[in-house]
Amino acid sequence: MKPSPFNYLNVTTIENALDALSSNDNARLIAGGQSLVPMMNFRLAQPDLIIDISNINELKNVTEEKDYVEIGSLLTHTNAINSICLKKYFPVISNALKNVAHHTIRNQGTVGGSIANADPASEWPLLINLLDCSIKVKSKKNTREIPATKFFESHFVTNLKENEIIISIKIPKIQNLYGWSFHEESPREGDFAIVETGVIIEIENNNIIKNANIIIGGVDEKVIKLNNIENFIIGMNINEDLCKFDEKIVLTNIHPISDNHSSEEYKKHLSIVLLKKAINSAKKQILSKLND
Amino acid sequence: MINKFKIETIVNDKKYTKIIEPRLLASDFIRDNLNLTGTHVGCEHGVCGSCTIKIDGVTSRSCLKFAVQLHGKKVETVESLNSNPQKKLILKTFKKFHALQCGFCTPGFLITVDELIENEKFQSENEIRKALSGNLCRCTGYENIIKAVLELIKIRNKK
Ligand SMILES: Cc1cc2nc3c(=O)[nH]c(=O)nc-3n(C[C@H](O)[C@H](O)[C@H](O)COP(=O)(O)OP(=O)(O)OC[C@H]3O[C@@H](n4cnc5c(N)ncnc54)[C@H](O)[C@@H]3O)c2cc1C
């Protein structure tokens, strides 16, 4: 349980990190180390060079702009939970992140590391999809913004190229009146989710649902956006029963597999239960906002 | 060729200068190079919590950091609790409630509890149970640990 030998480089600027990344084969960035170091201790990862980006202070900020909030890739889970700005515009973030591991892990783990790692049962990848974020990445020659729907490709696979670093995540502010919810089921407090669901429902003045984001994680190779269910509820009045959809539509869009925590059947059952719970709690929130 | 690094770090208010290999885990550095064996090594993948220390004032698993990353940082290990009268209260309260049996997990619990009681957010029993869920105890001593922490919170709130 000791990592194999590697060289180490501490960098304090993005430029130095990009230089090192582009001029070394088999180099890995380290942010919080909360996913990478376990993999190195098990020798599942054996990089020749570790580039330590955890001291690049410009990647730790939360910045509010007119239409969006931008968070640096090194923002820790703990600092995201405590951010007043994030709580004000996106209370679902702190609600969901309280389910990430335990507070000591949350003190060190970062949003950039979490999405680069792309575990399909992780909370940040679900939030990135739920909030329609875009991910700003940089290589030595190029800067690009990747929409959430293009970023995650499969289990632990993203659109990120080997010479790119995640700089920040842009979270667009939601203009309409909206309700949100996040629910997950895990074997123990702090464990990875068996199934996780997030819902955002936006309505217009006449109480008609204008937009919906319905996301589920832990049941496929990546976090899944349930377009069919979204389309089913868009256009409905918020007072209607939003959970009358055909359950088969959900089941054809997810592909859970049995593991030592639960069977495929159980995960399918849980998916339906959590989805309905999540949709109804987002709805309830809208109704109480309307009554205020 | 693997380069060695000269690091300077302050551990429990004492400055250390050591030459180490990058792959040395902070947990092994603290135990083997600094002889501070209060920090225990359990699972070595972040799950059990025995190796918890503080780096620049916040808790971290020392098995998930490399010693080389401690350069220029301030580290506190379980030994630091003994030198500060206010923090010694944590040790005394654990003793009073018999909040330990074999003692293997205890250093990790103590450092975690130190951070908990510094933070006003943690008040209720439920919050404390959640916050301690990252530390495993195999003598099943959780009940007494919770009782000790509740007492510490009570004392803190009186101040
Ligand atoms: C006991 C335990 C329980 C956990 N439980 C959960 C859980 O329930 N839910 C959950 O979501 N997570 C969980 N985690 C993982 C945790 O959230 C990690 O913090 C996160 O997955 C990785 O973030 P990090 O900053 O530590 O990344 P690191 O471990 O430093 O890096 C992870 C990967 O991302 C790459 N990377 C890091 N930063 C960047 C960047 N800026 N640009 C490009 N690539 C980058 C690295 O090269 C590496 O490949 C758990 C971890 C532990 C140890």
Image (cartoon, rainbow, N blue to C red):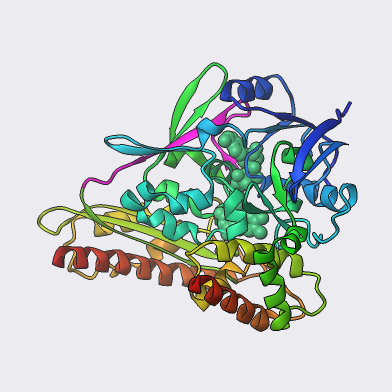
Residue at position x 72%, y 64% from top?
A: B108
Position of A218 with respect to A96 (left or right) is: right
Q: Nearer the viewer, residue B66 or A130?
A: B66
Asked if one can make out residue A209 in the rendered structure from this viewpoint, the answer is yes
Total marks in image: 0
Residue B26, percent across and down? 78, 47
Residue at position x 75%, y 63% from top?
A: B82
Residue A250, percent across and down? 41, 62
**Residue B43 occupies which quadrant of the picture?**
bottom right
Q: Is residue A159 magenta?
A: yes
**Is A224 drawn above or below residue B111 in the view shown?**
above
Q: Nearer the viewer, residue B27 or A246?
A: B27
Residue A90, percent across and down? 35, 51
Q: Which residues are magenta?
A: A157-175
Q: Is residue A114 magenta?
A: no
Position of A41 with respect to B151 (left or right) is: right
**Is B2 drawn above or below residue A276 in the view shown?**
above
Residue at position x 89%, y 26% from top?
A: B1
Residue B66, percent across and down? 76, 43
In the rendered image, the quadrant that contains the C terminus of chain A is bottom left
**Residue A172 occupies which quadrant of the picture?**
top left
Residue at position x 30%, y 69% from top?
A: A280
Q: Nearer the viewer, residue B16 or A114?
A: B16
Asked if one can make out residue A156 in the rendered structure from this viewpoint, the answer is no
Give the residue furthest to the left: A206
